[in-house]
């Protein structure tokens, strides 16, 4: 199983210059190759592309400077474009699970910059990493690499931070799970409510609730700062030094938000996956919800998609079963106890008493329990009361069409 391991490093001034040059060349090669692909009726082969945008381009006046940098990241850039196209076509044909991918895009100078070195282009000696034609860099090794890396990507993010991202092979971990299965309901106010009663939310719960809890970071203060700076940015003249400075300030704040979120999501997903044998999530239509402008900011901060990706990857690592159930399952419209369907509830309604069996439910808790039930394929006797429902009974494990199982990536 492949994984990425990322470490920060601080290049010398000279290395900064060399890297800036390399990033520029990688970007130009990618953009030239992409322009060729867009023009041709049939996608040119990797070899043909390399010949055109690297070997032959080096002989021209406009692209002669390509020979000043290592050839390996340039070839990799063309190869990566090939992979991007393959993923895009697979996604179009429905061969690739997950979010639909767009066609490869041109790289911009203002976005995050990357250059990838394969074996041969880099080597590790002791604490130092040698990059071809860049020199030795000393990353901050916050942990040991689990195995010898097959490639390393040098990244410069929008806040001018530098990282090395290694692709490594990791082995799966065998720990027995405490619990059979868990269903998770994701929300805005409470990040996650579990079918076993645990609640993971922002802020502190009242003391009498002896529920498991983890605080989701409060992003609102940082977000306020970002919005203030964005207003400032809009007033500043284009290409001015002050504008550049504001842009970097904004990028730094975005990084702080992303780091806090990543940390929270990593801890939570590790906990959930290590403790449970089967993990069931609901497929949320995040991109659809983000179109609702009022909710958009709150949702994009939550990182549901990121959380799902983490749970999925860690499930593989821990040999767990990971299920995503259809977003059309009426998990919040059905009584967990008796299966009675009360229909759609307004978002304001936080708890409900079942009209049929009298059970009292917390809205999210009930949904989480239903998600778990559907995920592990317990039908209960809910069919009886669900006849009128358009969405029908909870899915069985055997009903492949309604349960999207995690694809092995
Ligand atoms: Zn009931």
Image (cartoon, grey):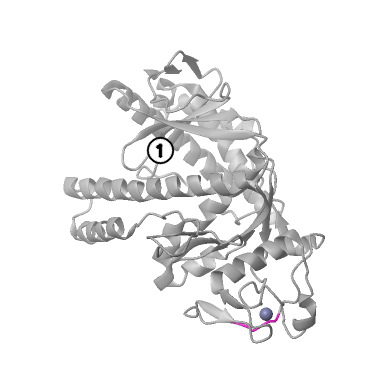
* Ligand 1, image quadrant it occupies: bottom right
x, y (%) of residue 45? 65, 36
Name which residue lies at 50% across and 32% down: 5
Toward the top, the furthest residue is: 125
Name which residue lies at 37% across and 40% down: 157
Name which residue lies at 29% across and 55% down: 222
Q: Is mark 1 within 8 Å of ligand 1?
A: no
Give the structural element (helix, strand or loop) at label 1.
strand
343 in magenta? yes
Query: 372 left or right of 291?
Result: right
352 in magenta? no
* Image quarter in which the N terminus is found: top right
Name which residue lies at 49% across and 22% down: 71
x, y (%) of residue 67? 44, 22
Q: Which residue is mark 1?
A: 113
Closest to the observer, 149 or 247:
149
Q: Which residues are magenta?
A: 340-344
Q: Do we see residue 38 in this rendering?
A: no
x, y (%) of residue 305? 53, 55
Dominant secondary-structure state across the stretch colored magenta:
loop
Query: 4 left or right of 108?
Result: right
The local crowd at label 1, few if under 14, some if 14 to 19, many if 20 or more residues have their Cα within 10 Å, is many
Closest to the observer, 235 or 391:
391
């Amino acid at each position: 199983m492949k994984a990425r391991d990322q470490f920060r490093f601080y290049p010398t001034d000279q290395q900064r210059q060399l890297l800036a040059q390399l990033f520029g060349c990688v970007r130009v090669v990618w953009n030239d190759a992409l322009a060729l692909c867009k023009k041709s009726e049939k996608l040119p082969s990797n070899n043909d592309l390399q010949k055109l945008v690297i070997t032959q381009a080096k002989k021209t006046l406009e692209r002669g400077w390509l020979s000043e940098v290592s050839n390996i990241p340039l070839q990799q850039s063309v190869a990566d474009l090939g992979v991007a196209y393959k993923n895009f076509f697979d996604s179009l044909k429905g061969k690739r699970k997950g979010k639909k991918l767009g066609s490869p895009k041109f790289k911009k100078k203002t976005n995050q910059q990357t250059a990838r070195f394969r074996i041969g282009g880099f080597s590790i000696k002791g604490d130092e990493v040698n990059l071809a034609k860049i020199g030795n860099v000393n990353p901050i090794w916050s942990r040991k690499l689990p195995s010898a890396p097959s490639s390393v990507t040098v990244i410069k993010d929008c806040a001018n931070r530098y990282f090395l991202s290694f692709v490594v092979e990791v082995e799966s971990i065998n720990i027995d799970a405490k619990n059979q299965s868990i269903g998770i309901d994701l929300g805005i106010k409470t990040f996650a409510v579990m079918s076993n009663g645990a609640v993971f939310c922002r802020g502190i719960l009242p003391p009498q609730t002896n529920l498991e809890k983890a605080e989701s970071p409060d992003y609102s203060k940082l977000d306020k700062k970002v919005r203030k700076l964005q207003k400032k940015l809009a007033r500043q003249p284009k290409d001015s030094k002050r504008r550049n400075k504001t842009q970097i300030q904004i990028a730094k704040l975005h990084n702080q938000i992303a780091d806090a979120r990543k940390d929270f999501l990593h801890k939570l997903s590790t906990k959930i996956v290590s403790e449970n044998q089967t993990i069931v999530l609901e497929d949320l239509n995040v991109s659809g919800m983000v179109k609702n402008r009022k909710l958009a900011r709150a949702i994009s901060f939550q990182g549901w998609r990121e959380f799902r990706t983490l749970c999925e990857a860690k499930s593989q690592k821990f040999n767990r079963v990971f299920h995503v159930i259809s977003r059309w399952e009426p998990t919040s419209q059905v009584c967990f106890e008796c299966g009675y369907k009360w229909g759609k509830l307004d978002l304001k309604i936080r708890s409900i008493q079942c009209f049929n069996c009298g059970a009292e439910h917390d809205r999210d808790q009930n949904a989480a329990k239903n998600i778990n039930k559907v995920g592990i394929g317990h039908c209960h006797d809910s069919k009886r009361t669900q006849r009128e429902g358009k969405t029908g009974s909870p899915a069985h494990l055997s009903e492949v069409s309604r349960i999207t199982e995690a694809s092995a990536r």
